[in-house]
Image: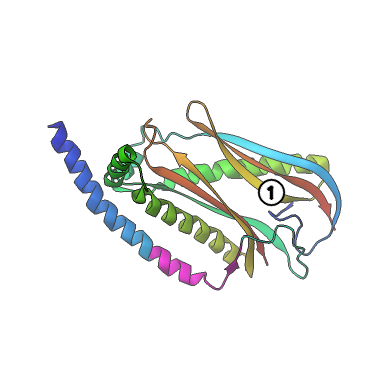
Amino acid sequence: MELSNIESIPGKQIESYFGIVQGSSVRSKHVGRDFAAGLKNIFGGELKGYTELLNESREEAVQRMIAHAKNKGANAIVNVRFSTSSIAAGAAEIFAYGTAVKVI
Amino acid sequence: MGLIFFITILVLGYFVGRYLENKHLKQLLIQEREVQHLAWRNTGLKEDFKDCSGTLVYGSVVIAQDAFKNFLAGLINIFGGRITSYESLLERARREAILRARQKAMQLGAKQLVNLRLETSTISINNQNSSGAVEVFCYATALI
């Protein structure tokens, strides 16, 4: 499954369109009573654990979008966009969407 | 007693925070030099690229602000104005996220990055509303 965030797949021709596909995952936006993060909040710096966590979350959202596209019989997704939105109670939804196409 | 604790945290935050920030900025300069030949732009959405293949690449980072700068931001919040203590945080986070996307593209042997987009969101720590941690996510199409 090829992905791109422009309206075409470089080097390929789009044969047919299958409509919008999407995938999302919800993650807690609170780091909670994590001691290491509490320390980092005094000294500053990258929260590596949380970067990993959000990366995994995003990967999951992308995998779900790919599965959705496979179901429709597509072999590529173009114009992939991401959106992160706050949900109540400190959770964030990572949402990936794009247009599923068949390329040759 | 509580005041002494608070001031200790601020002083710790100030010195260690400055040290870590400068270390990060130096690291950014070095790593950016390694990827500098990889061109990147945020145009290209509707362009047709022939004679190359491409794929989506992305990079992200979560960076927390130190206690001293958070305190400073709280003060500025009373009087209004530019919160310069957060501006440097966001600048660093953006540079790091874009750098990671470019590194991923370089690993794939890409020649350029097109349609680069950035997304920023806030992270809270320990149930505070504004703890000064921010996530920047950068995604683009790498042309190989």
Subunit of label 1: A
Up/down of B92 relative to B51, above or below: above
The residue positioned farthest toward the top in the image shown: A89
Q: Is residue B98 left or right of residue A71?
A: left
Please indicate, yes or no, whether residue A91 appears anywhere in the rendered image. Answer: yes
- Which of the image's four quarters has the C terminus of chain B? bottom right
Q: Quadrant location of residue A94? A: top right
Q: Is residue A53 left or right of residue B19?
A: right
Q: In the displayed structure, would residue B17 be above or below residue B142? A: above
Colour setup of the view: rainbow
Q: Is residue B113 magenta?
A: no
Position of residue B44 measured from the top left corner of the image (x, y, whole percent): 69, 61
Residue at 47% x, 46% y is B135
> Measuring 67% from the left and 38% from the top, which residue is drawn there?
A23
Residue A59 occupies quadrant: top right
Chain part drawn in magenta: B27-41
User: Looking at the image, is A49 positioned above or below residue B98?
Assistant: above
Badge 1 crowding class, 10 Å Cα cut-off, few under 14, some 14 to 19, many 20 or more, is many
As helix, strand or loop, the secondary structure at mark 1 comes to strand
Left or right side of B61 for A68: right
Q: Is residue B36 magenta?
A: yes
The answer, for residue A45, to whether it is visible in the render is: no
Point out the image quarter for the N terminus of chain B: top left
Residue at 45%, 67% in the rendered image: B31
Residue B95 on image: x %, y %: 47, 59
- Tell me if B57 is positioned left or right of B137 in this view: right
Q: Which residue sits furthest right?
A: A15
Q: Nearer the viewer, residue B61 or A6?
A: A6
**Which residue is labeled 1 in the image?**
A80
Three-letter code for the amino acid on which mark 1 is drawn: Val
Q: Position of residue A50 (x, y in %)?
A: 45, 43
